[in-house]
Image: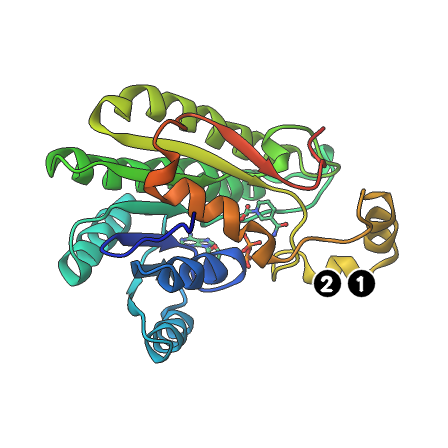
Amino acid sequence: MELRLEGKTALVTGASSGLGWRFAGTLAAAGARVALAARRTERLAALAAEIERAGGRAHALAMDVTDVASVRAGVAAAEAALGPLDVLVNNSGVSVTKRAGEIEEADYDFMMDTNAKGAFFVAQAVGRSMIAAKRPGRIVNIASSAGLRVLGQLSVYCMSKAAVIQMTRALALEWGRYGINVNALCPGYIETEMNRDYWQTDGGRKLVATLPRRRVGQPADLDGLLLLLASEQSGFVNGAAIAADDGLSL
Ligand SMILES: NC(=O)c1ccc[n+]([C@@H]2O[C@H](COP(=O)([O-])OP(=O)(O)OC[C@H]3O[C@@H](n4cnc5c(N)ncnc54)[C@H](OP(=O)(O)O)[C@@H]3O)[C@@H](O)[C@H]2O)c1
């Protein structure tokens, strides 16, 4: 069975790089119209052009997920441009690698405001719209293996991603009755701008040597799970946190 999204409209936050860039292209290639959100709008315009050159439909819009007014305006702009949303990929996120004793208040706020608060208000804005329109939908929250287990020097990042997983369960329980499925996709180590330099360091190379397949994942490794959670074929999957991490969270 092929997972297709023809006639669906999706919003991807954090589409200006890394996983979000890939997710947006993957959804568009499956037939969805895709709204692309982030702060670096010049990058989103480049991605929108790439998607349209490939025959898809995309719309770029500015959104700062730490600013609730910006989130609400962005969701409204996405729907004005492409129609009511059927799918949200709630992907914007940041990390700071430091030992717990060295975390500054600003580091804490940066991660929690983006990863936990930001993800909540994006999901809320999209969920409200789906419920008001009486349309079923799919919300895919991009959590992390770091929400399922503890990773070194990432205490607050782990806390923020555990919050995303608990948020996923809470929203799934509240919104399942409206036909809105809310799930968390939990990637392991995937090479993106967030971590690319690290894999070239001694520490990075040592870590890769401990991984089951001795390799870091690539964004394309998440395509299948993303499409499943975004599609109608995942109708009975709700409130799940599914790892795509080659066993890292075990
Ligand atoms: N790469 C991994 O190994 C890995 C593993 C597990 C989970 N994840 C999660 O996957 C998601 C994507 O990460 P990535 O690896 O693709 O990192 P990335 O390449 O650094 O991309 C992060 C994205 O988040 C956006 N973003 C950051 N702050 C934002 C804000 N305030 N408002 C709106 N957008 C914001 C950035 O866009 P702008 O800067 O343009 O706003 C960018 O598009 C994150 O939630 C991350 O925690 C990544």
Q: Residue at x 45, y 64 (%)?
A: 16
Q: Which residue is mark 2?
A: 197
Residue found farthest to the front:
1
Q: Can you tell which quarter of the image residue 33 is in?
A: bottom left
Residue type beneath disc 2: Asp
- Asked whether the residues under the numbered discs 1 and 2 touch, taking CB atoms below 8 Å apart as contact, a structural biologist would say yes
* Tag 1 secondary structure: helix
Relative to 105, say whether 177 is above or below.
Answer: above
**Residue 77 x/y as whole percent:** 19, 58
How many residues crowd mark 1 within 10 Å: few (<14), some (14–19), many (20+)? few
Relative to 208, 124 lies left or right: left
Quadrant including the C terminus: top right
Q: Residue at x 35, y 25 (%)?
A: 172
Relative to 6, 183 lies left or right: right
Q: Nearer the viewer, residue 245 or 104?
A: 245
Residue type beneath disc 1: Gln
Real-space CA distance between mark 1 and mark 2, rounded to the nearest whole angstrom: 6 Å
**Residue 72 x/y as whole percent:** 22, 47
Relative to 207, say whether 164 is above or below.
Answer: above
Residue found farthest to the bottom:
53
Q: Residue at x 85, y 55 (%)?
A: 205
Q: Which mark is residue 200?
A: 1
Q: In this view of the protein, can residue 6 be seen by the observer?
A: yes
Residue found farthest to the left:
133
Relative to 147, 153 lies left or right: right
